[in-house]
Image (spheres, rainbow, N blue to C red):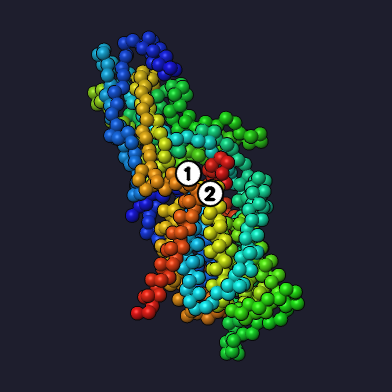
Amino acid sequence: MQIYLPIAEVSVNAFLLLGLGGMVGVLSGMFGVGGGFLMTPLLFFIGIPPAVAVATEANQIVASSFSGVLAHFRRKTVDLKMGTVLLSGGLVGAAFGVVLFNYLKAQGQVDLLVRLCYVVFLGVIGSLMFVESLNAIRKSRKNAGPPKRKKHNWIHGLPLKMRFRVSGLYISVIPPLIVGVLVGILAAIMGVGGGFIMVPAMIYLLGMPTKVVVGTSLFQIIFVTGFTTLLHATTNYTVDIALAVLLLVGGVIGAQVGTRLGTYLKAEQLRILLALLVILVCAKLALDLLLEPSELFSIGATGGH
Amino acid sequence: MKRLLLSLALIVATPVMAEEVVLGLSQDQVAITADFDGSEILLFGAVKRESPILQDPPLEVVIAVSGPSGPLTVRRKERKFGIWVNADAVEIDHAPSFYAVATSAPFNEAMSNVEDQRHRVSIPRAIRSVGAPMGIEDAQSFSEAVIRIRTSEGAYQVLENSVSVDEQTLFRTSIKMPANLTEGDYPTRIFLTRGGKVVSDYETVINVNKVGLERWLFDMSRNQPLMYGLMSLAIAIAAGWMASAAFQVLQRR
């Protein structure tokens, strides 16, 4: 069934969009990532103009994250206090990121920067996570007991300590704030919710338990992407509501399935799967940069991006 | 006025061959609805003349349908430091979003180069580029790239020998418009030619418009962007909540 999208001005298959939304939704619920880093390239691939894809994707992430976070709320795996601290850092970072993005756009080559950002961050995070979770799985096989992560490091020496009951942490608010700001900047530049950076940062830098991380990450993604949606809708007019509805119907159902699937897997298994996924996307993007494209020319709107 | 002068000049120069187009369209409006999946427009017409039919050279018909035009930036990738990046860019000041040329004979026979230049009928002539920035020597390859990319997308079509002409009087053709249509006025031109020379031309407009829900959403996104954005968010939140609630009910059973 073909559907004509009013803002994107292209005609696409409705079932294809429902399927894509569902698939990315499952991943979103399972791993606590918004799925933007997967969905945006997929939308480009089926012929949605990039500006519309990025803006509409933000709107769809709001829906799947909200659906996912409700499931996590019921299981009490959302650290609201931590989420709020991360979010306040994130909004500051996002605002700064938009300024940086516009500056780079004026210099040209912002496209390349975004791609390089993707390749570098996905590559580094993916391989680090892969190695770490592989070690964790090996250890748990040997000892049969849960692997113990380092509970004390330099982070615990910082002032302004706060108790995060759900995460079982008593740490300074400075590290989560900094993580929030950095992720916010990257999210604004790369046009994603930042889940795939936030999740590893919470696990490895803040030492939060994996089960809490997913819900907390989703919680803060809702606000960051909601903010982005409004920004795109009011400045670029690129949010396509018809596209968003099709994607999010699949997405919210997928997110529910994903959160339930997530409970059947061990934390290490969950992490290793996310790591593999991240590495896969990174490899695809890196190949695009390294191999000679079949069409060297591209058409862009004048004055747009 | 210009066209009037031109046709006056034609009449004065070739009083014997006074032939005129009378055109019919299967539709002069294309409505883009939610399930719009492309459209086929039938163009048909007749040649009105007061003098006997001239047998040689034969009458040929050239029809050009053009979409709304706008400026474009064409970028070319180049290998730098081992990776492929956008390097040179050329601005094309005027390229139609859709362009179809249908002729009753091979294009070169139906219309001479001089006439093509004057009326800008063939695809390369319909694209206008004022000038490439300094340092780009092969600016031509950039406009060729536009034609190549848009032709492969079905947005640019050359339909030679697709106009059928009966008795040098009646002609008809159909033009398929793709699903990815841009809204706007689509100027449609018909040329009657003999021996490559234009003996008469006629211009009309096909209107392509979004209607119904498509129209409403598009207008809202432009006129009330904040409301539109909030509506998108509300839908997203509601859908997320509904899915969560539905799954909870399912699980309890």
Residue B249, placed above or below residue B116 = below
Residue B12 image offset from top left, x and y in percent:
37, 9
> Circle 2 — which element?
helix
Q: Quadrant of residue A144?
A: bottom right
Report the amino acid beneath label 2: Thr
- Residue A146 is labelled as none
Q: Quadrant of residue A118?
A: bottom right
Report the amino acid beneath label 1: Asn
Residue B131, placed above or below residue A90 = above
Q: In this rendering, do the residues under marks 2 and 1 share a single chain?
A: no
Residue B228, placed above or below residue B71 = below
Q: On the image, numbered disc 2 is attached to which residue?
A: A234
Q: On the image, numbered disc 1 is attached to which residue?
A: B223
Residue B11 image offset from top left, x and y in percent:
36, 12
Q: Name the subunit of mark 1.
A: B
- Residue in the picture at 40% in, 33% down: B186
Q: Is residue A301 left or right of residue B68?
A: right
- Residue in the picture at 42% in, 36% down: B184
- Residue in the picture at 33% in, 36% down: B29
In terms of depth relative to the viewer, which is nearer, B160 or A161?
A161
Q: Name the subunit of mark 2.
A: A
- State whether residue A234 appears in this view: yes
